[in-house]
Amino acid sequence: MDLIPAPSPNFDARRAPPDMIVLHYTGMPSGEEALQRLREPEAKVSAHYLIEEDGRIFSLVAEERRAWHAGASFWKGERDINAVSIGIELVNPGHEWGYRAFPEPQVGVLVALLRAIRERWDIPDARILGHSDVAPDRKADPGELFPWHVLAHAGHGLWVEPPAAPGPALSLGDDGAGVFALQAGLTRLGYDSAPSGRFDEHTRAIITAFQRHWRPQRVDGVADGETRARLVHLLRAAA
């Protein structure tokens, strides 16, 4: 696996070894523009790696350093995700510029990069996440077209395929014990979803992010039976 040096000045010191990987899409018209932005001092954004659609990997920030890729974010009580994570940008125009599937060469190289990173650092499967997982109110990447199941089948990340679980759906405006239990489960998994018993806009954003990662066939922010079944099985897998 050949890395192309493309140093970014946008980093600072870590306070602990990384134990998380956060995947992004670049969300720009081209990879060249994304690479340029990640290296501009004025932009104050970066990542550790950028992977082009043809499989080229650019190395921007050393893994031992804190890159600036996650922004305002949260997972399992941690609000400085940059401090504990390695950020990987995947070239893709994103939802604004013509979102499309991630090519096989790009995904194959990502799998190899994940394997190499995890040989250097202790990163559990449950802490291989998307930007939308750690920032559901403001981010949608890498999105519902990203093949999380391919990564999991290669040994990186969590994926479950529970049996069908029909049941009443929970959605915006609902309240009660069912919503409270749903929020409690999302909190246990890692989301910033303190139980209130009210299905509000923040809960809908979290459900949407959850679906983009673990139920991409239907991303609507509604906690139907299948969504809730996947949450239950993921909690078991992450335990």
Image (cartoon, rainbow, N blue to C red):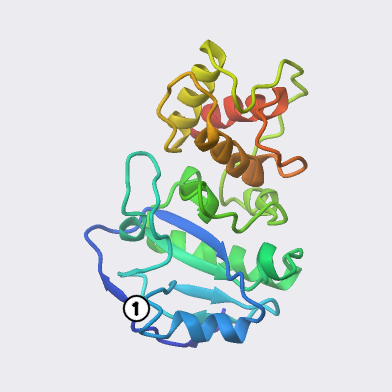
Question: Vertically, is 133 above or below 46?
Answer: above
Q: Residue at x 53, y 12 (%)?
A: 176
Does 239 sit above or below residue 83?
above
State the SS at label 1: loop
**Residue beneath disc 1:** 10
Please state the horizontal and vertical placement of residue 57, each as a whole percent of the image.
56, 79
**Foreground residue among 196 and 161:** 196
Q: Position of residue 209 (x, y in %)?
A: 59, 44
Q: Residue at x 59, y 54 (%)?
A: 140
Taking the spot 77% from the left edge, 18% from the top edge, the residue there is 166
Image quadrant holding the N terminus, namely bottom right
Q: Quadrant of residue 205?
A: top right
Relative side of 80 to 185, left or right: left
Residue extending farthest to the top is 177
Q: Quadrant of residue 15?
A: bottom left
How many tags in the picture?
1
Left or right for 17, reference 87? left
Determine the image quadrant of residue 27. bottom right
Residue type beneath disc 1: Asn
Which residue is drawn at the image coordinates 66% and 70% (left, top)?
92
Residue 62 location, x and y as percent?
36, 76
- Residue 199 position, x and y percent, is 54, 25
